[in-house]
Image: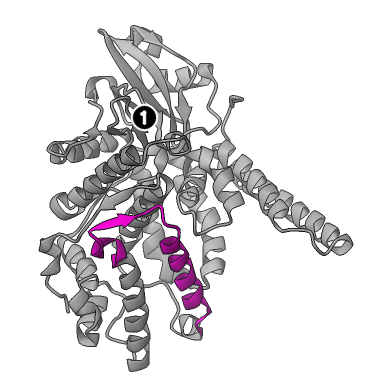
């Protein structure tokens, strides 16, 4: 893959790249409609493929939070046309890397010495590259190491990138800027944490220690003495990227084993640690040669406040789901409803979230759930389309809910989509502790 020799870091330069992608997309539409006039049977898939390619090319050269958006979209197979999902999927571990000489400069600026001086050996060619940084292989004192090096200027560009994206999100969601401000602040906060490798190291060690009793999982060890806020050094783990492994022929028993390890990992974090790995896209996992699941990136982690946890899982309690009063109390606890909510508004959201909760709970209700069955994901898409067409969605519109919903939902639906990718059958079930979770008023 061709290397990049630079990244636009200034606000004007990055805005120009966004605008340039928009011009290309506009030209693709002109071409599509011209073909459509000549041949009415022209399919839209060609337009989607061209747009996806041009948008990904722009985002992959910008990297940072811009490419992170593509990474998040590629994790949801139901949100966008398949052409976009396929085009954006390389963002998870095969984005265009920065050139070796440039990455050496970044390392030296952060650590005070070159990687060749610090490590016994250092490969200047990236092993893989994603949205925030790229990984190189090194050795030190007989240890095989993975060294993650952050792209230059990425941390400083997060706020300006989100400001560029915000107007599009506001128009797409048909909401007021004031409505989405808390959510953008949450996203910005998480992206800034992800750009601080000291925080990643601390979050990783906290989760790894808390999950040490789980089986079929392998984690890297971390080396603070060879790390900084822009450099992260950890053990090298041999394995096949999960997205590649899933596309190969695999015994169903092994798919189920990997899927069970992933389910247990998230189940334990949520219900025992209240601290979760909030980015379960396939690029963050490997399948080790011994058949265990390796978790190799902890860039996005999140603390789950106790009051939010109980309100969220009270919503999934089957007794509460059938009781309007209980559901209403839960929606107040999640900040979906407030004191100003009118009776018809309350009823609309009670019914809507009863349907949503029923879908989200479906995997928990089964002793064993087959995530390879696409019907579940079709049902999610159908419900989303139905709610979006409901006139009350516009009438009572606006961004609603606790800011914590963003990354908790991202974790769960990211988990579900990844389990669908590997076609795993998983023993699920709802832990007893959340069945009796108290309601919040």
Q: Nearer the viewer, residue 277 or 433?
A: 433
**Secondary structure of the residue carrying numbered label 1:** loop
The residue sitting at the bottom extreme is 343
Instruction: State the quadrant of the N terminus.
Output: top right
Q: Nearer the viewer, residue 242 or 115?
A: 242
- The total number of labels drawn is 1
Q: Mark 1 highlights which residue?
A: 230
Q: Residue at the right extreme?
A: 38
Coloring applied to the structure: one colour
Q: Residues within 10 Å of mark 1 (few under 14, many from 20)?
A: many
Which residue is more in the foreground, 222 or 377? 377
Q: Which residues are magenta?
A: 361-390
Q: Main secondary structure of the magenta part?
A: helix
Q: Is residue 214 above or below residue 106?
A: below
**Looking at this view, is 387 or 426 the one in front?**
426
Residue 377 lies, with reference to residue 248, above or below; the image says below
User: Does residue 16 appear in the picture of this structure?
Assistant: no
Is 220 situated left or right of 25 in this image? left
């Amino acid at each position: 893959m061709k290397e990049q020799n630079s990244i636009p870091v200034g606000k004007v330069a990055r805005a120009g790249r966004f605008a340039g992608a928009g011009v290309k997309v506009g030209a693709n539409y002109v071409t599509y409609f011209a073909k459509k006039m000549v041949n009415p049977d022209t399919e839209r898939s060609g337009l989607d493929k061209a747009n996806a390619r041009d948008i990904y090319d722009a985002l992959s050269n910008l990297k940072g939070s811009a490419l992170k958006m593509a990474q998040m979209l590629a994790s949801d197979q139901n949100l966008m046309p398949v052409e976009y999902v396929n085009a954006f999927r390389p963002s998870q571990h095969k984005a265009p890397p920065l050139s070796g000489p440039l990455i050496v400069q970044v390392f030296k600026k952060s650590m005070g010495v070159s990687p060749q001086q610090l490590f016994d050996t250092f490969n200047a060619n990236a092993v893989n590259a994603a949205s925030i940084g790229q990984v190189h292989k090194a050795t030190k004192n007989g240890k095989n190491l993975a060294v993650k090096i952050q792209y230059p200027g990425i941390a400083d560009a997060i706020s300006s990138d989100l400001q560029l994206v915000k107007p599009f999100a506001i128009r797409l969601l048909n909401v007021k800027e004031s409505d989405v401000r808390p959510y953008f602040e949450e996203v910005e906060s998480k992206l800034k944490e992800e750009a601080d490798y000291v925080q990643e190291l601390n979050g990783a060690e906290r989760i790894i220690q808390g999950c040490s009793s789980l089986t079929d999982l392998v984690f890297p060890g971390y080396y603070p003495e060879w790390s900084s806020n822009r450099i992260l050094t950890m053990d090298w783990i041999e394995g096949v990227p999960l997205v590649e492994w899933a596309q190969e022929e695999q015994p169903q028993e092994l798919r189920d084993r990997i899927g069970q390890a992933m389910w247990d990992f998230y189940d334990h974090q949520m219900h025992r640690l209240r601290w979760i790995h909030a980015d379960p896209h396939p690029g963050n996992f490997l399948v080790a040669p011994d058949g265990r699941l390796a978790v190799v990136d902890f860039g996005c982690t999140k603390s789950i406040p106790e009051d939010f946890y109980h309100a969220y899982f009270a919503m999934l309690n089957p007794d509460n789901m059938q009781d309007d009063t209980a559901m209403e109390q839960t929606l107040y606890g999640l900040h979906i409803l407030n004191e100003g909510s009118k009776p018809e508004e309350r009823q609309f959201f009670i019914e809507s979230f009863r349907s949503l909760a029923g879908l989200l709970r479906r995997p928990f209700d089964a002793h064993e759930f087959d995530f390879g069955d696409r019907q579940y994901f079709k049902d999610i898409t159908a419900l989303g389309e139905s709610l979006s067409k409901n006139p009350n969605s516009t009438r009572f519109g606006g961004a609603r809910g606790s800011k914590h919903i963003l990354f908790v939902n991202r974790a769960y639906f990211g988990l579900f989509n990844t389990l669908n990718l590997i076609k795993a059958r998983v023993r699920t079930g709802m832990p007893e502790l959340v069945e009796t979770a108290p309601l919040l008023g």
